[in-house]
Amino acid sequence: MARKVIVLGEIRDKALRNVSFEAIAAAKVLANGGEVVGILIGEKAANLASDMIAYGADRVVVAENEKFKHYTPDGYAQALMAVIEEEKPEGIVFGHTSLGKDLSPKIAAKLNAGLVSDVTAIEADGDNITFIRPIYSGKAFEKRVVTEGIMLVTVRPNNIAPLEKNEERTGKVASISVEIKDLRTIVKDVVRKASEGVDLSEAKVIIAGGRGVKSAEGFKPLQELAEVLGGAVGASRGACDAGYCDYSMQIGQTGKVVTPDLYIACGISGAIQHLAGMSNSKVIVAINKDPEANIFKVADYGIVGDLFDVVPMLTEEFKKL
Ligand code: FAD
């Protein structure tokens, strides 16, 4: 059975986040040969429609409104519900991001539908779609099927490969005007930290520091390595609690969940709550003074040593490449 599936494109800094393209790839599987419709909600969003099409959307619906300069839960829900009423899709895919995690349950409740969240893989066998998602902080995976109603899904960033970008693909772009009423919250402004670099949740390479880094200053060698590798710097809660870095960098059960291609853990013991946020990384390298540290149990490569010797050495070697 071919299905119509809509995908919410997520805009940040006037560009689409990568997870939007991964969501399109997921939507293609759900659509089973049917139509994939990209949805863009923003103050000015139409110029991003061609990107959604280049990554596989068959057409795009744009809801522009000055009230959408920043994400507003009520406003986005109103716009998306207007599109859903018009399009009557059989599936909806979001990124499993802060926005997707906030908006998707609202939409599911409005539609009286179920929600399969944090999907890392999709198996398709003809009409039958099986969603795979981690449970118990990543220690096990469960398989879910949707037996009735609309399939609402959020996909974890960095797990489902996007389709190859093809700028020659064409598709219709239409606008929908939505009357936005009774917004209960309005975001007036978003102030970013000046030093914010690569987005942690979408980074392909993450260098993470733990309590072993010992101070804010101690993060400098990690930052240098991250710069050489084009990656982002993350942290354990131990490092955040100690005041070495900002909580926005925390990875784990109560922090961000990341799945980079390469995760280098420096001075992190590997507590279960930390592993919950990074154990699905493709390659894990652990640097720790303690050969018995738990992090070595999940590491593909382990270096027993002082991070303040090892990390600068790695940086120098990578610079030569
Ligand atoms: P430690 O456990 O103190 O480990 C430091 C490591 O550094 C040690 O293994 C040591 O051998 C090594 N080391 C020291 N000096 C050096 C050096 N010079 N070179 C190399 N290695 C060195 N934690 C998270 O990370 N994320 C979460 O989201 C999270 N959520 C939590 C939720 C709950 C409800 C609870 C109870 C806890 C949570 N925690 C979380 C905390 C977690 O249990 C650990 O306390 C925390 O992860 C420990 O951080 P750490 O590994 O940096 O510190």
Image (cartoon, rainbow, N blue to C red):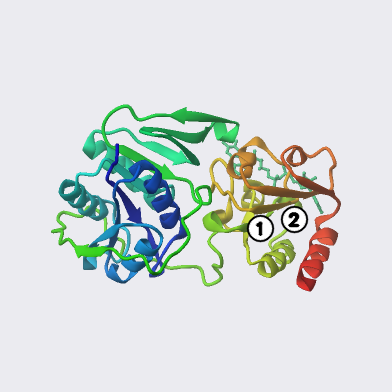
Residue in view at x 76 percent, y 72 percent = 319
Horizontal and vertical percent position of residue 96: 43, 47
Q: Nearer the viewer, residue 118 or 143?
A: 143
Tell me: residue 117, above or below residue 239.
above
Q: Which of 50 and 268 is in front in this view?
A: 50
Circle 1 sits on which residue? 244
Quarter holding residue 49: bottom left
Q: Which of 138 and 247 is in front in this view?
A: 138
Horizontal and vertical percent position of residue 223: 68, 66
Which quarter shows the N terminus? top left
Cβ of mark 2 under 8 A from ligand 1: yes
Which quarter shows the C terminus? bottom right
Task: Inspect this view and state whether residue 215 appears.
Answer: yes
Residue in view at x 19 percent, y 64 percent = 175
Helix, strand or loop at label 2? It is loop
**Left or right of 128 in this view: 160:** right
Circle 2 sits on which residue? 214
Q: Label 1 amino acid?
A: Tyr
Which disc number belongs to residue 120?
A: none
Horizontal and vertical percent position of residue 19: 45, 55
Helix, strand or loop at label 1? It is loop
